[in-house]
Image (cartoon, rainbow, N blue to C red):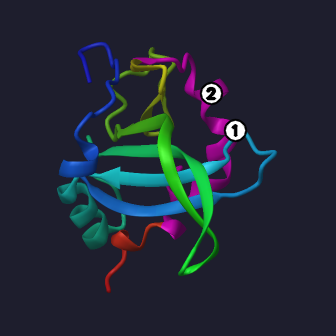
Amino acid sequence: MDSQGGISRPTDFRTNFVHLGSYAVLDEKSASRGLHDVYTEKASAEHYRKTGKFPDGATLVKEIRKLETSAMTTGDPVVWGSDAAVWFVMVKDAKGRFASNPLWGDGWGWALFKADAPAKNVAVSYAADCMGCHVPAAKTDRVFIQGYPTLTQH
């Protein structure tokens, strides 16, 4: 994140972050079709497990990968995620640092990166580009935590 609230896509998240969980959107008509893998820093996951809240500065990365299917010895069909299509990045902002930046609000910074230009945030307004999906998760800090077993004690 830069001093103006510009968000960059972490490039090392599969190696250096922990995997929170996955959602599979199988509907062929859905614009969200794909395997949705979500990651955060280990310290952020540990903080959430202790407090039930993400710490200020926590970064969530949702990577949506295209779906592939095939018959395999384990089942038919077997579905897996292949090439990345998009990445959504959220940065927790408990302090309201960037109130004048349209990509910051409701306690988070919001960004969208596409596979054809993975270094460019193509979102222009969190209200227009992000809230359509995140309104139902208002009670859980705009995060769909029910699919993230890493955030619970086991």
Q: Name the residue that disc number 1 marks.
A: 132
Whether residue 89 sits left or right of residue 45 in the image: it is right
Is mark 1 in CB contact (under 8 Å) with mark 2? yes
State the residue at coordinates (37%, 21%): 98
> Is residue 50 shown above or below 83?
below
Say if the magenta span includes residue 123.
yes
Q: CA distance from mark 1 to mark 2?
A: 7 Å
> Quick one: 60 or 64, which is closer to the camera?
64
Q: Amino acid at mark 1?
A: Gly
- Horizontal and vertical percent position of residue 1: 26, 24
Say if the magenta span includes residue 133.
yes
Judged by its main secondary structure, the magenta piece is helix
- Horizontal and vertical percent position of residue 8: 32, 24
Which quarter of the rendering shows the C terminus?
A: bottom left
State the residue at coordinates (60%, 51%): 67
State the residue at coordinates (45%, 54%): 37
Q: Name the residue that disc number 2 marks.
A: 129
- Horizontal and vertical percent position of residue 86: 51, 34
Residue 57 shows up from this direction: yes
